[in-house]
Image (tube, rainbow, N blue to C red):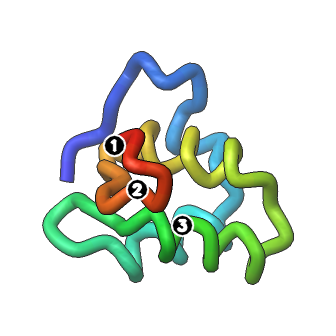
């Protein structure tokens, strides 16, 4: 899994709990939008934070519930 540099968030700035959860639930560098929503709720974090963290870790969000990506 490669880390992106343009997300504005550095991987080391991501809370450890969120970083570990994203890495535990990603498959082949991807995580579903539904799973990202679940993680945000479980960790009591805004969706934007989860999305930015995924981007910084090079994890692509797929199967968007709104059809955005």
Q: Quadrant of the C terminus?
A: top left
Q: CA distance from mark 2 to mark 1?
A: 5 Å
Residue 57 position within the rendered picture, expressed as x and y whole percent measured from the top left: 39, 47
Residue 31 position within the rendered picture, expressed as x and y whole percent measured from the top left: 35, 66
Which quarter of the picture shows residue 64? bottom left
Tell me the crowding category of disc 3: few under 14, some 14 to 19, or many 20 or more residues within 10 angstroms, Cα based: many
**Residue at the farthest left position:** 28
Residue 25 position within the rendered picture, expressed as x and y whole percent measured from the top left: 39, 79
- Is 2 positioned to the left or the right of 9 in the image? left
- Is 69 positioned to the left or the right of 21 in the image? left
In the image, residue 26 above or below residue 52:
below
Marks 3 and 2 close (CB-CB < 8 Å):
no
Element marked by disc 2: loop
Which numbered marker is on residue 69? 1
Element marked by disc 3: helix
- Residue shown at 50%/72% (left/top)? 34
Marks 3 and 1 close (CB-CB < 8 Å):
no
Tell me the crowding category of disc 1: few under 14, some 14 to 19, or many 20 or more residues within 10 angstroms, Cα based: few
* Residue holding disc 3: 36
* Residue holding disc 2: 64
Which numbered marker is on residue 59? none
- Residue shown at 54%/63% (left/top)? 19
- Is 29 positioned to the left or the right of 45 in the image? left
Element marked by disc 1: loop
Of the image marks 3 and 2, the number of the one nearer the N terminus: 3
């Amino acid at each position: 899994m490669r880390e992106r540099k343009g997300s504005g968030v550095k991987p080391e700035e991501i809370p450890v709990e969120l970083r570990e959860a994203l890495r535990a639930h990603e498959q082949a560098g991807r995580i579903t939008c539904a799973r990202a929503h679940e993680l945000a709720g479980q960790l009591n974090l805004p969706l934007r934070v989860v999305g930015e963290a995924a981007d910084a870790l090079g994890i692509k969000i797929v199967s968007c519930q709104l059809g955005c990506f």
